[in-house]
Image: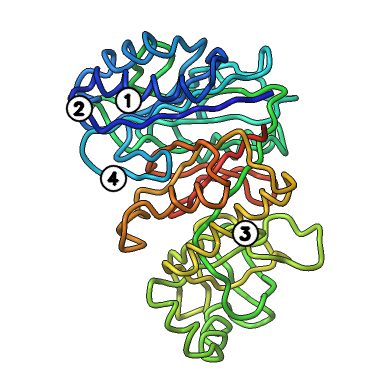
Amino acid sequence: MVSIGCGLSTARDARAGAAEAAAAARRGLAGEPCDLAVVFAAGNHLAAPEATLEAIHDALEPEDLVGCGAAGVLAHGREVEDGTSVAVWAASLPEDGARTFHATVQEVEGGGALAGMPDLEGATGAILLAESRSFPTDPVLRFLAGAVPGVPIMGGVASASTHDGSGALFLGDEVLDEGAVGVRLQGVEVLPCVSQGAAPVGPELTITAAEGNVISELAGKPALTKVRETLDALPASEREMLSGGLLLGIVISSGKPDFVQGDFLVRGLVGADPQDGSIAVGLPVHAGQVVRLHARDAVSADRDLRDALGVRMLALGGEPPAGALVFSCNGRGRGMFGSRDHDAEAVDQELAGAPAAGFFAAGEIGPVGGESFLHGFTATVAVFPA
């Protein structure tokens, strides 16, 4: 049985705000002990984050705690994108359901060595919060995909530092300035939801020649030629969607004949060579993969998030989950939707008011096609069944 509570405070006094948010999270547990707290702190909380953690420990008494500095936080259908705020997410879990850790990557001859990461074999999932300057999240996720395939890893990259410029990762009552902190989940079911905020346009195309991250041919033609042909054939409504930039969705797992929106890993086009007609994308590709052009706008981002959450509710038989952790890109919010609270409200509405909290990340972590990636402009949600 999983119970979840969460709280949010915008009090300018960091200690008072932390106590207020933690007390609200504790009330949500309805008398159950707090086995795990996840904390996202912004503004004045990063002047002396140890004081914020102390107040949370006093009010909530969590067995374990992880968290990070944030550009903004969200909880209870509300988003705070700037200023001082703190969100506290608290969970009562099955015995030995959560094990926290601090992972680092040490330089060694020929590359890096990952230290502190627990063995994820047999885990039901993991939460990972990384510090961008000291933790190479992309390579670590690629390593873990090979080492423990199928284990969903969810989380995000810290989007704010302490006021003296140091990294802001939280573990227990400590503030750490490098690496990544996280939670290994054991016997705790988690449904990952990754909304990339982009809609497919045009037909599916097969890569017929590629090397590294460069696509030479699509459907037997020079890639750039085929992209231009596809764009020319789009209806005016879909061409208008592309005003925000052209993206490419790549199918990672091709074990089924038909693909839906969530099967595509969306990446930007990073270059094109008019001489040979090739295009470059933001990850390695190979011949035989199926791709499709994508567009990102507020309407498609809203629909994609709500549809993805709706699929998780169907998996739960329509019953509200115990709660959710939300990792939304710091490029979303008012910048993408033109108004505040979009992602927080969508999660609250689609998950039937289940307690949810999270932060605006500088990169979001979640699985597509069974493999976890670092994304941008996504809303990644870890849904915990009751």
Nearer the observer: mark 4 or 3; the answer is 4
* Quadrant of the image occupied by residue 45: top left
Q: Earlier in the sequence, mark 1 or mark 2?
A: 2
- Residue on which the image places disc 3: 285
- Residue on which the image places disc 2: 44
Bin the neighbour count of mark 3 within 10 Å (Cα to Cα): few under 14, some 14-19, many 20 and up: many
* Quadrant of the image occupied by residue 290: bottom right
Q: Amino acid at mark 3?
A: Val
Disc 3 versus disc 2: distance between alpha carbons?
A: 44 Å
Q: From this view, report whether residue 198 is shown above or below residue 158.
A: below
Q: Position of residue 223 (x, y in %)?
A: 57, 77
Q: Tell me, what colour scheme is on the image? A: rainbow
Nearer the observer: mark 3 or 2; the answer is 2
Which of the two residues, 184 or 372, is positioned nearer the viewer here? 184
- Residue on which the image places disc 4: 81
- Residue on which the image places disc 1: 168
Disc 4 versus disc 2: distance between alpha carbons?
A: 14 Å
Q: Amino acid at mark 4?
A: Glu
Given contact means CB atoms under 8 Å apart, are the residues at marks 3 and 1 in contact?
no
Which residue is rendered at x = 32% and y = 18% of the image?
Answer: 19
